[in-house]
Amino acid sequence: MVETRHIVFLGAFYAGLSASHYFLKHVYPHLPNEPEVQYKAILVDPSTKWFTRHAAPRAIIKEELMPTNLIFRDIESAYKQYGDKVEFLQGKATAWDERARTVSIQKANGESQTIDHWALILATGTKATSPLFSLQGTPHTDVESAIQEMRGRLASAKDIVIAGGGPAAVESAGEIGSEISSMERRQAASSAATVSLRPSREVPQSGGSRCTLQHESLLKSGSRRWQDKVILHDGEELETDIYIPAMGVRPMSEYVPDHLKNEKGYVIQNNSTLRVDAAGPRVYAIGDIGTYSNDGIMEIINGVPVMETNLKRDLLAAHLDPNGKAEGEDRLCVREEGEMQLVPVGRSKGVGAVFGWRIPSTLVWLIKGRDFMTSKANEYVSGKAVENLQGEGLRKPSEHGRQGH
Ligand SMILES: Cc1cc2nc3c(=O)[nH]c(=O)nc-3n(C[C@H](O)[C@H](O)[C@H](O)COP(=O)(O)OP(=O)(O)OC[C@H]3O[C@@H](n4cnc5c(N)ncnc54)[C@H](O)[C@@H]3O)c2cc1C
Ligand SMILES: *[C@@H]1O[C@H](CO)[C@@H](O)[C@H](O)[C@H]1NC(C)=O
Ligand SMILES: *[C@@H]1O[C@H](CO)[C@@H](O)[C@H](O)[C@H]1NC(C)=O
């Protein structure tokens, strides 16, 4: 009888895509090839498309600035190169029994399915408050329609309130500021529009009881204009043409048992090996979802080769004996303390907001190269981004430490 061992990746975005491509390119070929024991990767995500998340602040303005077909990329077709070594399941993980080593999946077609995992990689990331800025653990069409709606409303809005103080808020303010002060727009609108930024602390986060976000869109009688109403913490009521909540992110970890999460909902892992030790053997967390990360892309680029080396060591050790433990030293993740750099936001000098965001210099392409992001996105989707990633972000545990590959 053939035994098929599932290597399950939950989430197929930056972290899940990078980890699964890396697995199929650099780990799978090293696994023993025996007729009676087969390995198979299973990728689970409710969204079949990649969404270029950091392009969102520009994408919400108008199609000409950031065409929809460039920010959404099909991910399933990128896995055809691996044949039947991998399967893509469009669905959402709704429960995980770490003792039985099974995950329940609510599939897009309405059916539910339980899959057992030999190894499990948690990569379900974080979601922004607004569907404008991230996938929400639902199909990408939710993001797409939110962007379309926003584009329609922005065209005629007179005042826009953005809540938050992080990159999504400030970049959006910069982009909208650039747009409303553009010539074209000034000619079209009878009077000037304003965009204002409200710090997150003034605005209720959705979730808590007293803090329920009372954010309603109502078609005001007579005015025939959409208005959003926001009630701030201090009771002040804000009425505005457009309200954009852009205040931080929350982990998408509802399916993870409580004892494996910290108080904020992030998955507790060994920040060095990236294993989730409390969940049994061969379980890992990568990307925003894990405690090792500060919710950035650098941690993914640094973390993937580390996690995969440990995964490979664990798989080889357990090939003949499920309780087999990898010998020698683990590969460890070290935090990048690179040079920091200031990055301006906004399309042209003197309009909109100019904001300094401190990020490692290696990430500057993400912002400076925003217009070229689409080619970079393709590399993540196709797996090219991880082809030569093996050496980065690694520290030799010791002179004689095992390096995997
Ligand atoms: C506006 C904006 C600008 C940014 N700019 C930068 C930047 O310049 N530099 C930088 O380093 N970072 C930036 N970030 C952060 C960066 O986008 C994140 O670090 C990155 O997206 C994290 O990737 P991830 O794969 O871990 O998680 P996510 O991007 O959150 O992806 C998670 C995936 O898991 C799926 N999923 C969710 N729940 C489930 C479930 N239950 N079952 C199965 N699948 C599920 C989702 O559909 C999604 O595909 C920015 C973020 C935003 C919002
Ligand atoms: C994390 O893993 C490393 C390497 O195996 C180990 O030395 C360390 O003790 C672990 N940390 C915790 C907190 O368990
Ligand atoms: C892992 O990192 C998080 C966030 O930086 C920290 O809160 C946590 O204590 C770390 N865990 C360990 C075991 O060091």
Image: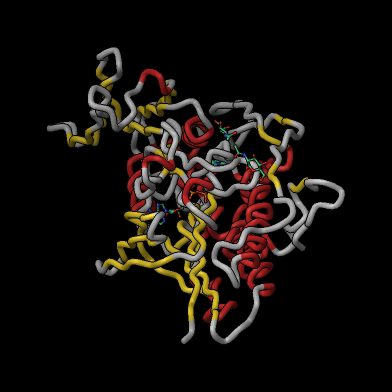
From the viewer's side, name the closer residue of 320 and 190.
Answer: 320
Q: Look at the picture and state if 17 lies above or below 217.
A: below
Q: Quadrant of residue 117?
A: bottom left
Q: Residue furthest right?
A: 399
Above or below, 161 relative to 40: above
Which residue is painted at 65% across and 63% down in the image? Answer: 312
Q: Residue at x 28, y 66 (%)?
A: 112
Residue 79 screen position, x and y as percent: 54, 73
Quarter of the figure that contains the C terminus = bottom right
Can residue 186 be seen here? The reply is no
Badge count: 0
Q: Is residue 333 left or right of residue 39?
A: right
Left or right of 36, for residue 238: left
Taking the view exactly as shown, the residue that stands out farthest to the top is: 234
Q: Is residue 94 above or below residue 6?
A: above
Who is closer to the viewer here, 307 or 196?
A: 307
* Percent coordinates x, y for residue 16 in the rendering: 53, 57
Residue 335 % position (x, y): 69, 37
Q: Position of residue 17 (x, y in %)?
A: 55, 60
Residue 113 visible (yes or no): yes
Residue at 60%, 26% in the rendered image: 355
Instruction: Give me the residue at 33% from left, 61% from top.
Output: 104
Residue 237 occupies which quadrant of the picture?
top left
| Chosen colour scheme | secondary structure
